[in-house]
Amino acid sequence: MLSTIEFIDKQKLIKAGDVIGVGVSGGSDSMALLSFLAENQQKYDIEVIAIHVDHGIRENSYMDADFVKEKAKELGVRFYKFRIDAPKLAKDKNVSLETAARDGRYGVFNTLLRKGVVDKIALAHHALDQAETILMHIFRGAGVAGAKGMEPIRDHVYIRPMLTTTKEEILNYLSEHQIEYVDDYTNSDTSYNRNYVRNVIMKDILKRWPNAVNAITAFGQSVTDDDEYINSHIYADAMMFEDKLVRIPSSYFLYPNSIVTRVIFKALKGIGITCDIERKHLRAIKDLAINGANGNRLYLPFDAIVFKEYDYVTISNRKQEETTLNQPFKCGEFEVANFGKVNIKRVKSFEPCEGRLYIDYKKLPKSAVWRFRQDGDMFTKFGGGTKKLKSYFIDKKIPVRQRDNIPVLADGNEVYAIAGVEISEKVKLDENATLGYMIEVKK
C-alpha cells in the first residue's frame, strides 16, 4: 500500500519508538492495517499491539476475538481483548447502539493511552470511510467542521494511516499477502446509519459517478484548507477555561457567523466535546448569547449545559452531583460537591485574604448550620442593608448555576455567612476583637 506509506510520512503520523495499538475488529480493513504495520515495525522502529473490543452485540462475537488473537500470534504482536456491553450502554445513556459502541470502544482506547500501555491508537478508516463520513456529517447539518471529515491525527494520539488509501488498494493488499479476515453480518444491516450510507447511498452514487470518493474527499480537503485559514485569523484569548468549563464573552457572538461557529467549536473542544454537535446546536447557543435572559440555560448532547451569565456564555461539561448539606458550625473541614472545601479555624489574626472570611462566633446563634440556600432566606450584607439572598446573589452577579451549590451559614431564614463570598453585618468582628473564626474556601 504505497499510498499509505506516503501518507504516513507526509502527515508524520509515526515516530521512532512509538508503541502503537491497532483497533482490530477482524474485518478486512483492520486486518490490512494490522498486517501492514506489523510488517513495517522495523522500518518505522515501532512496536505494534493488536486491540480487539467485543461490543457484546452478537452472540458469536467471541469467535472474532479468537480469530484476531490467532492472527496476532502469527504476526508476532501482542494481543489485548476487551468486552463491553454496548446494548446496555445504549439503554442506560439513551443513545443509539452505534454511539454506545463507539463510546465504549474509545473508552477502552483512552484507558490504554492513559495507563501508558500504548502511545498511539491506529484506526483503519480509509478513503471510502472518509467520503461516507463527510456525507453523514452534511446530512446531520454539522456544517464546515463536519464537511472536513476525519483528521489524519486527532488529539496527537489517534492516527488514521489509511485515510487516503482506497478500498481497492486494501483488497489488493489482502489478496497479494493472503491475509484472512472475517465478515461481520451486521455490516449489511441498514438500520445503522453508517451501513445505510455505505450500502445504499454510496452504491447508487458510485454507479453514476465512479470518481465520487475522490471528489468528496477532495471537497473535504478544500474545506479543511479554508477552515485553517479562517481559524488563523480568530483571536479568542478572552475565553476562560477551567476544568470542563469555559466562559465566552458575549461580545464574541456579534461577529459574523463564520467566526462565531469557530469560536464555539474552539470552546467546546477545549472542554472535551468533539462530536455530536450539529448546526442546530450552534444556532441555539448563539441565540441564547444574544437574546437569552441572564440565568437561561440550554442542554447539549453528552450532558453539557450552556448558561447565559451576565456578560458571558458559560459551557459546562461537568457532571453535577445532587447533594444535601446540613453541617453544624464547628472548627474543622468539610467538602461540598460542585463547590470545594470549607475550613473553619479559631484565629487571633484577621489579615484580609482572598477566599477567607472572619466572624464573631459569640454573635452566631448556636443552632446555626451550614446548608444550601432556601426560599425566604434573608441576608444583612457587611456594612448594612438587608435584602433577600436571591437579590444579593444578583447584585454580586453570582451565576445561577453556582447559587445552589454555595454553602450558607444560617439559622432559620437568617443567613450569617456565604462561603467564599461575604459575612453578615450581624456577625462581624468588633474593632477590639482578639479572637475570631476564619472561614476559608478552597475550590
Image: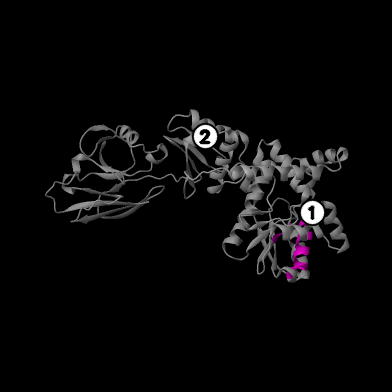
Q: Position of residue 85 (x, y in %)?
A: 64, 52
Which disc number belongs to residue 2? none
Q: Position of residue 115 (x, y in %)?
A: 57, 64
Disc 2, SS = helix
Confirm whether residue 278 shows in the render.
Answer: yes
Name the side, left or right, on which 247 lies relative to 442: right
Name the side, left or right, on which 176 lies relative to 281: right
Q: In this view of the protein, which residue sits in the foreground, 92 or 116?
A: 116
Q: Residue at x 81, y 52 (%)?
A: 166
Name the side, left or right, on which 81 lies relative to 178: left
Q: Position of residue 301 (x, y in %)?
A: 57, 40
Q: Earlier in the sequence, mark 1 or mark 2?
A: 1
Q: Quadrant of the N terminus?
A: bottom right
Q: Which stretch appears magenta?
A: 22-41
Coloration mode: one colour
What residue type is disc 2 on? Phe
Judge whether 369 appears above or below 119 on screen: above
Residue 6 in the magenta stretch? The answer is: no
Q: Residue at x 43, y 35 (%)?
A: 311
Disc 1, SS = loop
Q: Dot 2: few (<14), some (14–19), or many (≥20) neighbours within 10 Å?
A: many
Which disc number belongs to residue 165? 1
Q: In this view of the protein, which residue sits in the foreground, 309 or 330?
A: 309
Judge whether 254 appears above or below 442 on screen: above
Q: Residue at x 77, y 42 (%)?
A: 216
Residue 28 in the magenta stretch? The answer is: yes
Q: Position of residue 283 (x, y in %)?
A: 58, 32
Tally of numbered tags: 2
Q: Circle 2 is placed at which residue position? A: 253
What residue type is disc 1 on? Thr
